[in-house]
Image (spheres, rainbow, N blue to C red):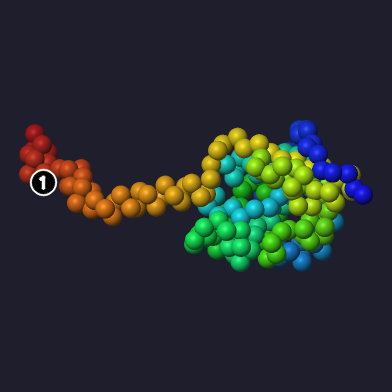
Amino acid sequence: MPPAPRAASRQPAKRRRADPSLSFEDKIKPPGELARRAGALARPLVFTNGVFDLLHRGHVTYLEEARALGAALVVALNGDASARRLGKGEGRPVNPLEDRMALVAALASVDAVTWFDEDTPAALIEALKPEVLVKGGDWPVEKIVGGRETLARGGRVVSIPFEHQRSTTALLERIRKARARSTAHPASGARGRARSRGSPGRGRARSRR
């Protein structure tokens, strides 16, 4: 039986940025094509996955730290149906898969982007066989999908603590509350805009001085 996943200490790796001559959209590959080209990916290969619905500072920092653990970083995103099955809330994901992948691919820390329609990326992990498997700090290493198989191959499983406590769900809640306040008090917003423009007569008088 393979050993149970255990936390791996993070060790600095030489940083090599993705080929600057490539368009960021060139990084996006269908899962089958990426699996066939797995041998061409720089090693040690780092793999992570997630929804990445509204990209925020926490995401960007997390992916930067994941990239530092190897020579290349592959990010697999939940397809739209897969993301909905996670039960993150009504209307999620806000952004469709194509938009979410484009934003992640535009990051310099990311070398390749793909997706999976299943509930987990287990099949994709098995096809790519990354040397380093990474998830965010809210995932105990023993719960990370593909962890046992990665360790059995001599790889590492890493749970990266969040440096910036950000959440797409919390961000959306703040937006909804702000919209609700604006809808509940439309007159106050109009008065504020009028005050910011000032009186036309006073403005002309000042300009003549």
Residue 191: x percent and y percent? 18, 47
In percent of the image, x 10 and y 46: which residue is there? 200
In percent of the image, x 61 and y 48: which residue is there? 107
Judge from the rendering whether residue 124 lies leftward or rightward of residue 93; answer left or right.
right
For disc 1, the marked residue is 200
Q: Is residue 27 visible?
A: no
Judge from the rendering whether residue 187 lies leftward or rightward of residue 105; answer left or right.
left
Q: Nearer the viewer, residue 155 or 205?
A: 155
Residue 45: x percent and y percent? 79, 48
Corner quadrant of residue 10: top right
Residue 134: x percent and y percent? 73, 45
Q: Nearer the viewer, residue 33 or 141?
A: 141
In percent of the image, x 41 and y 50: which residue is there? 175
Residue 105: x percent and y percent? 63, 54
Corner quadrant of residue 113: bottom right
Judge from the rendering whether residue 10 lies leftward or rightward of residue 163; answer left or right.
right
Residue at disc 1, secondary structure: helix
Judge from the rendering whether residue 98 lies leftward or rightward of residue 17; answer left or right.
left
Q: Is residue 84 above or below residue 10?
A: below
In percent of the image, x 57 and y 41: which residue is there? 58
Q: Is residue 59 visible?
A: yes
- At label 1, the amino acid type is Pro
How many labels were placed on the picture? 1
Judge the density around disc 1: few (<14), some (14-19), many (≥20) Cα neighbours within 10 Å: few
Given the current orientation, which residue lies at the most extreme right position? 1
The C terminus, quarter of image:
top left
